[in-house]
Amino acid sequence: MLDLQRLRALHAVSVHGTVGAAASALGYTPSAVSQQIAKLERETRTVLLEREGRGVRLTADAEQLVDAAQELLAIVERTETELERRRGEPSGRLTMAAFASAARGLMPSVLADLAARHPALDVRLSEIDPHLSVGMVAKGAVDLVVAHDWDVAPLRMPPGVERAVIGDDHCTLLVPEGHPFADRASVRREELGGQRWVCQPPGRVCHDWLVRTLRAIGHEPEIVHQADENPTLVALVAAGLGISVIPRLGRGPLPPGVVELPLEPMPVRRLYALWREGASRRPAITETVRTLRELWPKVAGDVDR
């Protein structure tokens, strides 16, 4: 009989792409994941992983097992959801993923609130960007995701995933002191052409917003520096190396040498909670989503002050 935990390990490798990333997601060591898959190979008498460069590739037999594992894990999830619903209290482990600025600016207060009111609920948070986390929740790698989109770059929803709006995060233009915009009361989007930009890398929602917005006004953005984290982008602006549009959530205080300006119209980043349809009745999901939405106005108010 196939072991569910070994199937779960193989499924995690399929979702995350490497043994190491799967181990991190499951809370195991890479050696433990490798051992689980080796035992599964002996049980099934087939090769499941093949070396490919520095990584691994799933064989055709492994892909078939992954499909079966996903179905079994969905059954387990529905059963756990029903048991938790009957108890009527959020409990058990809830795995979450949130993008960096939400993990920094929103999730600490949410996690603390949940821990104080629901001690039987064990929430585990990972910091993961939406371009990865949305697919992860669809595949069952995490239970709940906090993701975002921008006004010109809407979030693509996979089949079988539900969502709720958490709130809107305003985004502002940051320029160095002495920049021609620095003494302005505001700047219109039509004036953004011909600037040197610091921005997140391609594939990130912020990068997509900048490219689409400037192309819409007839300009190709000159992105001179790229960084994953907003504090790094702020530091590059402070050094006079470019300008940037950065959301306010999780940004932190601005250092000397940076001027903040409103853009007209103001860019808005909308935050969502996403979960699988099969888990929609689980009290841990509904309570966490409710807490996210309930605490957002205070978090957003603190950011805007």
Image (tube, grey):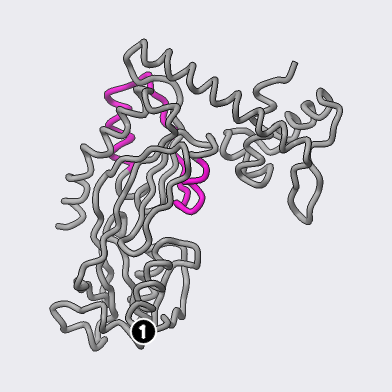
Among all residues in the image, which is located at the extreme right? 45
Depicted 78 relative to depicted 183: above or below? above
Frontmost residue, 97 versus 27 = 97
Query: Which class describes the residues within 10 Å of circle 1: few (<14), some (14-19), or many (20+)?
Result: few
Figure quadrant of residue 14: top right
Expressed as whole percent of the image width and height from the top left, the position of residue 17 reads 65, 47
Side of 239 where 27 appears, left or right: right
Depicted 252 relative to depicted 145: above or below? below
Residue at horizontal 65 percent and vertical 24 percent from the top: 5
Let me know if residue 126 is in the magenta part: yes
Disc 1: which residue:
218
Figure quadrant of residue 217: bottom left
Residue at horizontal 76 percent and vertical 31 percent from the top: 35
Q: Quadrant of the N terminus?
A: top right
Among all residues in the image, which is located at the extreme front? 159
Side of 169 where 127 appears, left or right: right
Residue at horizontal 71 percent and vertical 31 percent from the top: 65
Side of 227 where 104 appears, left or right: left
Depicted 195 relative to depicted 212: above or below? below
Expressed as whole percent of the image width and height from the top left, the position of residue 52 reads 79, 52
Side of 212 where 71 appears, left or right: right
Expressed as whole percent of the image width and height from the top left, the position of residue 304 reads 17, 57
Expressed as whole percent of the image width and height from the top left, the position of residue 284 reads 36, 25
Let me know if residue 219 is in the magenta part: no
Magenta extent? 107-136
Q: Amino acid at mark 1?
A: Gly
Residue at horizontal 23 percent and vertical 60 percent from the top: 170
Tag count in the figure?
1
Depicted 121 relative to depicted 234: above or below? above
Q: Secondary structure at mark 1?
A: loop
Judged by its main secondary structure, the magenta piece is: helix
